[in-house]
């Protein structure tokens, strides 16, 4: 299991999730209820209702909602959805989301550790 998972949007890290931090009982219950709701109500992907989603379909649904939560600055939902992915995909190291001309590409990276990003300062003369 990788201890760090990152969510990148168009190559820029948006979230870093540290799996070594213990979740509270409330957080664990919230994640359990998210999963229970998807199992009971299904998920909608590309306009189609999937009544018995598998783990891959749940992940697709979560990522679509994660992107929306990030774009609308919904920090609590963003955090919950990122946590869901990190907990349910323990080998996931990076989630790369790229948007280009209205098209969204999602890449689940399991074989390349996230190394972090460093800010670079420029002096303008």
Image (cartoon, rainbow, N blue to C red):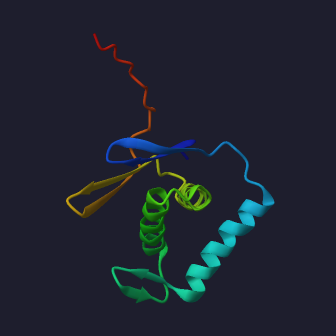
Residue with the most extreme top position: 125
x, y percent for residue 31: 66, 67
Q: Position of residue 28 (x, y in %)?
A: 72, 63
Q: Could you tell me which residue is drawn at 47 percent across and 51 percent down?
A: 92
Taking the spot 57% from the left edge, 83% from the top edge, the residue there is: 39
Locate residue 99: give its quadrant.
bottom left
Which residue ends up furthest to the left in the rendered image?
Answer: 101
Across the whole image, how many numbered discs are drawn on residues? 0
Residue at x-position 43% and y-position 70%:
56
- Residue 7: image location, x then y, percent: 45, 49
Q: Is residue 89 above or below residue 35?
A: above
Percent x, y of residue 60: 41, 69
Q: Is residue 123 left or right of residue 72?
A: left
Q: Is residue 18 left or right of residue 118?
A: right
Quick one: quadrant of the C terminus? top left
Q: Residue furthest right?
A: 25
Up-down relation of residue 79 to residue 118 (above or below): below
Q: Is residue 38 left or right of residue 111?
A: right
Taking the spot 28% from the left edge, 62% from the top edge, the residue there is: 104
């Amino acid at each position: 299991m990788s201890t760090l998972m990152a969510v990148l949007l168009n190559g820029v890290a948006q979230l870093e999730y540290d799996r070594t931090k213990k979740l509270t009982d409330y957080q664990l219950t919230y994640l359990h209820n998210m999963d229970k709701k998807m199992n009971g109500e299904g998920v909608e992907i590309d306009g189609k209702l999937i009544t018995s989603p598998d783990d891959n379909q749940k992940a697709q649904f979560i990522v679509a909602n994660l992107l929306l939560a990030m774009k609308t600055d919904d920090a609590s939902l963003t955090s919950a959805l990122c946590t869901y992915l990190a907990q349910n995909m323990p080998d996931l190291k990076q989630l790369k989301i790229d948007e280009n001309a209205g098209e969204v590409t999602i890449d689940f990276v399991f074989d390349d550790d996230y190394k972090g990003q460093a800010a670079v300062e420029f002096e303008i003369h």
